[in-house]
Image (cartoon, rainbow, N blue to C red):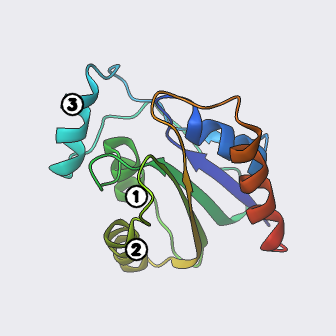
Amino acid sequence: MGNAVVYYSWTGNTEAAALEISDAAVKLCEEKQRGSFIGSACSALAGRRSKLRPFSLPDGTDGIFLGTPVWASHCTPAVNAFIEKTDFTGKKVFLFFTLASREAPEKLVSSMKCRIEKKGGSVCGCVSFQTKKGGDTGCRDLRGRARQWAESLSL
């Protein structure tokens, strides 16, 4: 049994965090490339789901690290689609977020936790990483904080 890291990233911030947690991460890719950030944020606000390219979790996955940028205080359409398609029965889920705001995304955490628990999962941890808009993948601080969080879970 093992853990899988699943994430969506637009600017590279969430990807940088995901790859610090595990270099064997599953990147969620949308079938259609997103246009403007404003249109994408509106899709997030509306709770829309993206059409995803096929993906699979490794056999024997019993824990999922699920990462998403926060758009307009909401989850990305790609992660909404992942939550809808995934059977979380018996799985421990650890949420991680990248966002420009200094405020923790409490409503988003609550919403995702509720949706995951309705599908049989258990949210066992959560962290948010404040980042700069426009991508800050070279930031050692972001990667260091992600690595430190994952190590603190002792999984």
Relative to 61, 136 lies left or right: left
Whole-number angstrom distance, CA of label 3 to CA of label 1: 23 Å
> Dots 1 and 2: beta carbons under 8 Å?
yes
Residues marked 3 and 1 touching at CB (< 8 Å): no
Instruction: Name the residue that disc number 1 marks.
Output: 83
Which residue is under mark 3?
38
Q: Which residue is mark 2?
A: 119
- Quarter occupied by residue 37: top left
Q: Nearer the viewer, mark 2 or mark 3?
A: 3
Q: Residue at x 70, y 50 (%)?
A: 58
- From the viewer's side, name the closer residue of 89 and 124: 124
Q: Residue at x 31, y 71 (%)?
A: 107
- Is residue 25 among what the camera can see? no
Q: Amino acid at mark 3?
A: Ile
Kindly report the distance in space between the C-alpha atoms of the residues bearing marks 2 and 3: 30 Å
Task: Decide which of tag 2 and tag 3 comes sooner along the chain.
Answer: 3
Q: Secondary structure at mark 3?
A: helix
Mark 3 or 1, nearer chain start: 3
Q: Residue at x 40, y 74 (%)?
A: 119
- Residue 96, percent across and down? 56, 59
Nearer to the camera, 51 or 137: 137
Secondary structure of the residue carrying tag 1 is: helix
Query: In the picture, residue 74 is in which quadrant?
Result: bottom left
Question: What amino acid type is highlighted by mark number 1?
Answer: Ile
Q: Tell me if I can see residue 74 in this picture.
A: yes
The location of residue 112, given as percent across then percent down, is 38, 68
